[in-house]
Amino acid sequence: MAMTGCGEGSGSGGADGASSKEAPRLPMDRYRFDSDYKRYGEAKDRLAQRCMVRRGFDDFPLHPKSPDSGARRLNLVAVAMSTPYGQLDLDHARRWGYGWDPKRQAKWEPDGRAMTNEEFAVLYGQQRREGLKGGCSGEADRRLLKGVKNPTHMWTYPSGREQHLEKAAKKDPRVRRALKSWAQCVVDKGFKRYKSPEDAFRDKVWGRGQGGNTTRTKRELGTAVADIECKREHDTVGVWSAVLAERQRADIAAHKADYEAVRRDLDTMRANVRSATGGSGSLRR
């Protein structure tokens, strides 16, 4: 199964002096798991590979294909805005509108050989072997999550609260006024009136195909540019992010125990990942 996505990346600029291509930093960023996905995945792959070697599969690849790799593959396309405020990169908008460069489309496929059916069964615990609950993949997860009190809470609590707060922020009178000014600005530049940058991003007229990319018509490119120019002219992101930061700080204070539990579990998980990878970006065998 291959995952495909888009977006220019949210960046992590500071709220005071962030690049115009970046979303301002927010209080909840410190509780997000997003930046850890890649490191966790790399560590898990390496630990699972070591486990397979210990069980007699000496040439087991780091990134194996599934046994039925010759079968038709399913591409899951995740088309999402890179920030809560929509696109921010003006150069990107001028060239790619609300889509992206097809040549740089994020698509990852395993680079190792296909597993045998026996290897697949051992990797994912489909064979009963002593001490191998969940297979080598499960063993890797257990090592990386050792000491983590509540993995599900760590992964899902901040994102759930974040979605709730983003919806609430959009209803704030200050944000509503900012979006109204932004929308009128887009109209004044000769384009359609939208309620929000998300509505502009998701306009069906952009003709997203099965792969999720847009057709990049002249009108799409013009709208995308006007979208970002109007955000800059009216400080839409500045107002919006200030309201969102205010709500996040209040939420963190109101649910301090929950957020601190997430932070402790993230610190534990990150220490486990560092231990598994030798404390650096390179992975030890």
Image (cartoon, grey):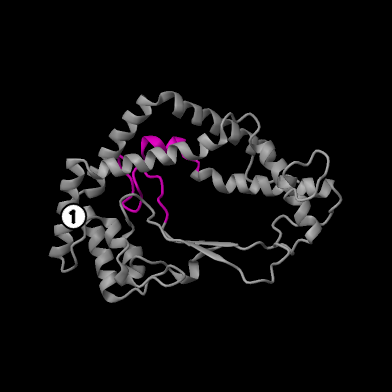
Residue 40: name its quadrant. top right
- Local crowd at mark 1 within 10 Å, few (<14), some, or many (≥20)? many
Q: Position of residue 91 (x, y in %)?
A: 33, 63
Who is closer to the viewer here, 192 or 59? 192
Expressed as whole percent of the image width and height from the top left, the position of residue 21 reads 34, 53
Please check the rendered image and state whether residue 199 is part of the magenta-colored stretch, yes or no. Answer: no
Q: Is residue 28 magenta?
A: yes
Task: Name the residue rendered at 60%, 62% in the picture.
Answer: 1
**Residue 204 position by quadrant:** bottom left
User: Compared with residue 164, is residue 218 higher up or lower down, i.e. above or below?
Assistant: below
Q: Is residue 194 left or right of residue 154?
A: left
Q: Is residue 162 above or below residue 183?
A: above
- In the image, taking residue 271 as reference, residue 190 lies left or right, namely left
Q: Can residue 26 be seen here?
A: yes
Name the residue located 46 percent from the left edge and 70 percent from the top edge: 211
Mark 1 belongs to which amino acid? Trp
Residue 282 in view: no
Q: Say how many tags the image has.
A: 1
Q: Main secondary structure of the magenta part?
A: loop
Q: Which of 86/207 is in front?
A: 207
Q: In terms of depth relative to the viewer, which is nearer, 112 or 251?
A: 251
Q: Which residues are magenta?
A: 9-33
Residue at the disc numbered 1: 182
In the picture, measured across the screen, residue 56 lies left or right of residue 3, that is: right
Q: Is residue 159 above or below residue 127?
A: above
Q: Is residue 195 above or below residue 128?
A: below
Image coordinates of residue 245 in percent, x first then y, are 31, 36
Q: Secondary structure at mark 1?
A: helix
Q: Residue at x 20, y 57 (%)?
A: 230
Give how far across and how far down residue 215 sits, in percent: 36, 75
